[in-house]
Image (cartoon, helix red, strand yellow):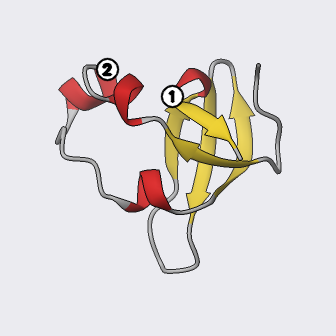
Amino acid sequence: MAVKKGDSVRAIASTLANSLEAKASDARFPKYLFETKGEVLELRGDYALIKFGQVPTPNIWLRQDQVETF
């Protein structure tokens, strides 16, 4: 199921583990991606721009299949 703008999401560790995103940068993703609530800010194609948590962290683009709503 595709996410929508405004949805609350968190990253799925198993889909990020061997992804292109993990291979293109540091594969050690911060814990907040999996433990805090993120909000979908924008959608472009297969990707969603997500803002995680209340602390100042950078927004991140993830494929929609790498996140789950909750």
Q: Which mark is residue 14?
A: none
- Vertical arrangement, residue 35 with respect to residue 54, above or below: above
Q: Residue at x 32, y 28 (%)?
A: 21
- Pointer 2: residues within 10 angstroms few (<14), some, or many (20+)? few
How many discs mark residues in the rendered view?
2
Q: Gap between marks 2 and 1, in whole Å?
A: 9 Å
Q: Residue at x 68, y 19 (%)?
A: 45
- Quarter that holds the N terminus: top right
Of pointers 2 and 1, the one earlier in the residue sequence? 2
Find residue 48 and report its image quarter: top right
- Vertical arrangement, residue 49 with respect to residue 64, above or below: below
**Percent position of residue 27, x then y:** 19, 38
Residue 11 in the figure: left or right of residue 21: right
**Percent position of residue 25, x then y:** 20, 37
Residue type at numbered disc 2: Ser
- Pointer 1: residues within 10 angstroms few (<14), some, or many (20+)? some
Furthest residue to the bottom?
55
- Vertical arrangement, residue 31 with respect to residue 14, above or below: below
Residue 7 in the figure: left or right of residue 38: right
* SS of the residue under disc 2: loop
**Percent position of residue 34, x then y:** 44, 51
Residue 23 in the figure: left or right of residue 9: left
**Percent position of residue 49, x then y:** 61, 44
Q: Residue at x 44, y 53 (%)?
A: 33
Identify the residue under disc 2. 19
Residue type at numbered disc 1: Gln
Dots 2, 1 in contact, CB < 8 A: yes
* SS of the residue under disc 1: helix
Identify the residue under disc 1. 66
